[in-house]
């Protein structure tokens, strides 16, 4: 039997947004929208990229709810 093709979790548009955010972080120009401070954390840069993708309406899984 042939393997079933996996559906992408994140769309290509989301990947582009995250890549852009990571490059801005490396350059030192990525800032937090709330405080306006520079972002140094890798995880925070990814979160910013995904949230920008969500605002654009790109397919991204929903945020996990805190319990």
Image (cartoon, helix red, strand yellow):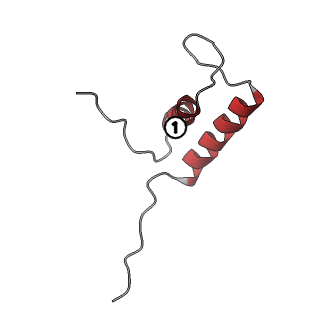
Q: Residue furthest bottom?
A: 1
Q: Residue furthest front?
A: 41
Between residue 15 and residue 45, name the one nearer to us: 45
Query: Where is residue 19 shown, x and y percent of the image?
Result: 65, 43
For label 1, count other residues whose C-alpha is less than 10 Å away and answer few (under 14), some (14-19) or many (20+). many
Residue at x 41%, y 68% (from the top left corner): 6
Q: On the image, numbered disc 1 is attached to which residue?
A: 50
Q: Residue furthest right?
A: 27
Res 1 quadrant in image: bottom left
Between residue 28 and residue 7, name the one nearer to us: 28
Above or below for 14 versus 7: above
Residue at x 55%, y 30% (from the top left corner): 48
Above or below for 36 versus 57: above
Query: Where is residue 33 shown, x and y percent of the image?
Result: 58, 17
Res 42 quadrant in image: top right
Q: How many numbered marks, from 0 up?
A: 1
Element under disc 1: helix
Q: Is the C terminus in the top left, top right, bottom left or bottom right quadrant?
A: top left
Residue at x 50%, y 44% (from the top left corner): 58
Res 7 quadrant in image: bottom left
Q: Residue furthest left?
A: 67
Query: Where is residue 34 shown, x and y percent of the image?
Result: 54, 13
């Amino acid at each position: 039997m042939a393997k079933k093709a996996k559906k992408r979790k994140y769309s290509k548009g989301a990947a582009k947004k995250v890549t852009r955010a990571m490059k801005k972080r490396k350059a030192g120009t990525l800032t937090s929208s709330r405080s306006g401070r520079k972002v140094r954390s890798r995880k925070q840069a990814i979160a910013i990229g995904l949230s920008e993708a969500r605002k654009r309406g790109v397919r991204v899984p929903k945020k996990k709810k805190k319990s």
